[in-house]
Image: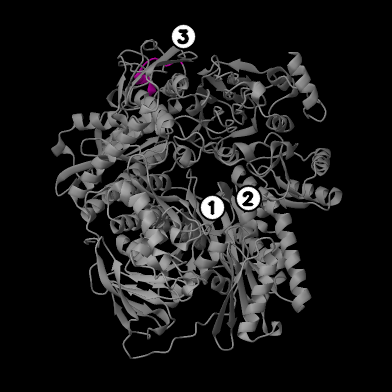
Amino acid sequence: MRIGIDVGGTFTDVVGIDDATGKIHYAKVPTAPKSPADGVFAGIEKILRIAGATMDAVAYIVHGTTIGTNALIERSGARTGLITTAGFRDVLEIGRVQRPAAGLYDFTVDNPPPLVPRELRVEVAERVGATGAVVTPLDEDDAVRAVAFLKDRGVEAIAVSLLFSFLYPDHEQRIAAIVRDRFPEADVCLSCEVAPEYREYERTSTTVINAYLTPITRRYIENLEVGLSKRWGDVDLRIMQASGGCMTAATAKARAIQMVNSGPAGGAVAGSFIGSSAGEDRLVTVDMGGTSFDIARVTGGAPTVTADGKFQGLPVKIPMIDINAIGAGGGSIAWVDAGGALNVGPVSAGSEPGPVCYGRGGMRPTVTDANLVLGRLNADYFLGGEIRLDVERAREAIATEVAGPMNMEVEEAAWGILRLVNAHMVKGISVSSTERGYDVREYAMVAFGGAGPLHAAELAFDMGIRKVVIPPYAGNLSALGLLVSDTRHDFVCTVMKTARSMDAADLTARFTKLETRAGDQLQREGVDRAAVETQWSADLRYEGQSYELNTALHRRGLLTAEDVQRLADDFNDLHKKIYAYSSADEEIEIVNLRVVATGRSPEVMLAGRDGGTEPAASKETRTVYFSEEGIACSIYERDEIPVAARLPGPCLIEERISTTVVPPEADATIDPNGSIVIEWGGRAC
Amino acid sequence: MTTKPNTTFKLDPISMQVIRYAMERIADEMGYTMVRTSRSIIIKEIMDITCAVSDSKGETIAQAHHAPMLLTGFEITTRALLDHFDEEDLHDGDVIISNDPYKGGQHIMDLQTFTPVRFDRRLIGLVASIAHHADMGGATAGGVAGGLTEIYQEGLRLPMVKLYREGAECDEIFGIIANNIRVPEKTLGDIRAQASANFVGARRMKEIYEKYGPEVVEGCCEMLKDYSERRIRAGLKKIPDGTYTGVDYVDDDGVRDEPVRIQVNIHKQGDHAKIDFEGTAPQAPGNINCPLATTHAAVYYALLCVIDPHVPPNAGCYRPFQVEVQEGSCVNPRMPGAVAARTNTSQKIAEAMMKALAQAVPAQVTAGSHGQISTCGFSGFQPKTNKRFVFIDIQGGGAGAMATKDGRDGQDSHLARFMNTPVESAEMEYPVRVERYALIPDSGGAGQYRGALAPRRDTRMLVDGISFARYGDRQAFAPFGLFGGKDGAMGRFYLTRRGEEPVRLKSKGFDTLSRDDVVSICCPGAGGYGDPLGRNLDALERDLLDGKVTPERAVEDYQVVVDAKTLRIDRAATAKARSDG
């Protein structure tokens, strides 16, 4: 058996897979905000009880934690010092100068302050030039002084980020040795290890975040290990990364940054898995919860990964699943502005007080309230009836806050709220796809999260997406994603040479060096060296461009001049595909080399649903709105729909944790894995 | 894709918002297309670009979130275009290019491209992309220079000509451009990126028409403009009636060593206002003249910031205003006045607007900021390949303090919204070495809220014969403080020749550099807001510990007693010193 355990804001979700039988167990326990580890222990106990298993039968546990994410949001990380090249300690604060987009006309919106105040940023005399040659040797006395200064100021962690360290790491490594020698209790993070790529601000920011989070995540993991071992002896604990892979707990202690934003990654990995199981390899996954709408893209069976991410306004140059989050969710508040226009969000009622219909003190109408008023949610069957929704209160709030000021009927106003939040999400998906150069109409959609299945079909229809997949257990999907994830590590080095001047033997040597590091790393994490799979790729661009395209090498091993040429050709093709032009006669630069190393986890087999021939029976009929006019609509219970039964829209499919809306033009079926598949049959889309 | 949505769209405020999102999406998608397909650093890293969608009357409906300087004056340009062409000459797939400051343009380096959009054969609007290019020919690379006096020296000036006809490139126009610029392979690539953005925009606009129908789209766009107008008028009503005047100065025009006065007069009454420039200097011989489109941009920018920063920025926003700019002044020059350095002037217009509005709505303005972008152009030949390079380095400065907060150190402020060039990018691409990139202590004006510190960048030349052209400003007139806040530091350019002492350079000028010469760009800081004695002592102590404020200046500006060793403030001694006066 394997266990995935994902700590969320309100609940800790647990999934246990019995590989012998293919049976999947699910459990939910309340998150212990003060001490999340206790929630983890409780969750493990519960899943073992449900599965009737003992820890002896558990091969490993994969854990998704928000401890790093939260520390960054709350700015509660360690007191951190930064050592830089002389003359550059303010790079971290100056950043890229540009105000945030939201501050275009609004002076009150600023870039976030740096994680390390100027007082704790120290310079050392040294300089490496743009070719990697030493211009000024490291002044060791200076370095010793810098470390002593930071020790004296009481820092817990030290980030070291020197110019061009990605070409010449020796100075950073020497400083690390000095820290270990003179200040061994400090955590030290080097930019040449955390993010060895060019662009000093982004690299420094990434390194600083890693240092800032290392002490607290390390302590959390140690604490977890102690607790697990006290209860169950030896346990193989793995930690989820934002890249969609996992790593051993031992590795995770030094790679705090790789855990940042790993929660949504679990969802994207699971969405990718379910979509692929439904026979689609090009997918847009959408995860709509209470406050946020997360969009990811899947090609070739895996979510796309970027090294160009940002979190909380700070650059994070490590491979992360490319998730675009927009502020729209079930809790988004609808309000009429001074000019008389309706707006939805960005303010959210969150889970506390939550939508008006929860009856927990929320007074402002939300998207969930609109869904309820329009008959799309069942007041008596929300979370399986755990919370009784108050329709009257929701109606009243919409009447007072929206319908009244806009001189509309309540249903019309509620329908307006849905149209608007949908338009907002459509805009998010479209802009996100253009930014990344793909056409969503060639993709299928996988929708999950509490509110995803309510909105997915209408979003898809609006954008010309022809197929929507609603996974089983759409509310526990992130935890399933943990178990689908493979052990993974990413290695990068900056080269900065033209493809024409790149010697194939040199390229092979550089890749081989990364490959060896990758093999060593995974071996340390218990993956048999022979079972390590690696992928080689390079970030290429036309000379003078400043953004690169990651281009896969078609093979590994001893590379020849033809392979280098093939790489250049593939880049030209990719460039044409994404940017609508290519220029084969232009000089191509090889900027970075990347090696992704994967140790595969055992495949997850979804227990197939039994086929049935009897037609599905609706459990009731209710008035549901698909426009300003309500229509009579059949309601089905998800677990009672036989596989392969065809349900014509309009209908609703209810389950404990979510409701799927099938609009009038569409049909729904249940596939053998238990996913709901919505399609627009023969009808033009 | 032909489909009718499952909702019957009608003209209501909700449809209006849905159409608004759809139109904003077009502008955003165009912006991303341009950034992703362009070649040069000035577009990809610096993002000195923007995109917009307008209706068939040339009125703006939506804009991408990039540089406001290129946005708010946009209608001057679209109207010039619709005057220039007969409607039947505007075809699908055309790309019209223009950079003529005397025909609705900004400066020569800003290439504006427009694509007409037709639906059922009828002209329904224009999509436009605007980008600042690294070079458009002329006397100096990137048009960066002081001392130029005529538009003819500033580069290739394109009237409104078709660069693409119905989707096909016009080789002749491309040829003319290629022959007149220094780095054609990059610039032409960037121009094609603009065209790609336009084609994406045009396609999307048609899709929206197909989906919702012309009546709904156009009706909603009219509603949207009315809505923005309503919001601006509502905001204006809250501002006390009266005439408010603000004055700022451009240090000099790069030719004559005398200040250029910028005066704005805002006559506000009820829900509308008239803005004039009575008292502003006449057209200057140098290149700091500000073309009309830029002047309008600066005025509207300041008004939107103060009145309603989050209003949908479309044509309706401008209706409550009447902007009068006399021809022949430095804010509406006559041919053949030079305009390349107009950013110095436009920023001062925005600053003068802030000063004027400070009298009416003190809580909604910022103190003086860097007010220019220290534009520097380094150009020469690569040592190994002997290929020409043009490196345009622009630096922000400090953002002014407000009634509620300090200026964010080293962050850009009004109008331009751009990124710096990473040190490592610059050094890998050009024969230079940056030796320092740091905040300048004490460059932020003291105040209850402190003005932002400015950055300093020192760059060493690694080859001989690099030409260094520049147009900086705020080196003679400091970023102003407000309501008792002190002025911020002025900017400076220094040149340290090998083995010599640093020499201060003129803010606008041109020099040839040798190997190992070091150029120091010290940007201007920003003004403080409110009485420095009202500053929270914890915040001041933080500044002392961070070395952002020196103990000497803390004593002088804030009248505190500081322990020189620990940099802590002695609160009791401070209270006593202050009460003793």
Left or right of B315 on screen, residue A499: right
Residue B328 forms part of the magenta stretch: no
Circle 1 chain: A
Q: Is label 3 in a helix, a strand or a loop?
A: loop
Give coordinates of residue A348: x percent, y percent: 47, 53
Q: Image height check: is A323 above or below B37?
A: below
Can residue A284 be seen from the camera position used here?
Answer: no
Left or right of A220 on screen, residue A197: left
> Which label belongs to residue B256?
3
Q: Are marks 2 and 3 in contact (CB under 8 Å)?
A: no
Circle 2 chain: A
Rounded to the nearest angstrom, the CA distance separating label 2 from label 1 is 19 Å
Discs 2/1, front: 2
Discs 2/3, front: 2
Q: Image height check: is B292 above or below A426?
A: above
Residue, disc 2: A74
- Magenta segment range? B147-155
Residue, disc 1: A309
Classify mark 2: residues with Cα within 10 Å, few (<14), some (14-19) or many (20+).
few
Residue B152 forms part of the magenta stretch: yes
Depth check, front residue: B486 or A136: B486
Q: Quadrant of the N terminus of chain A?
A: bottom right
Depth check, front residue: A118 or A77: A77
Circle 3 chain: B
Count all numbered tags in the image, as a single digit.
Answer: 3
Classify mark 3: residues with Cα within 10 Å, few (<14), some (14-19) or many (20+).
few
Q: Image height check: is B333 above or below B399?
A: above
Rounded to the nearest angstrom, the CA distance separating label 2 from label 3 is 54 Å
Q: Residue B278 occupies which quadrant of the picture?
A: top left
The amino acid at mark 2 is Glu
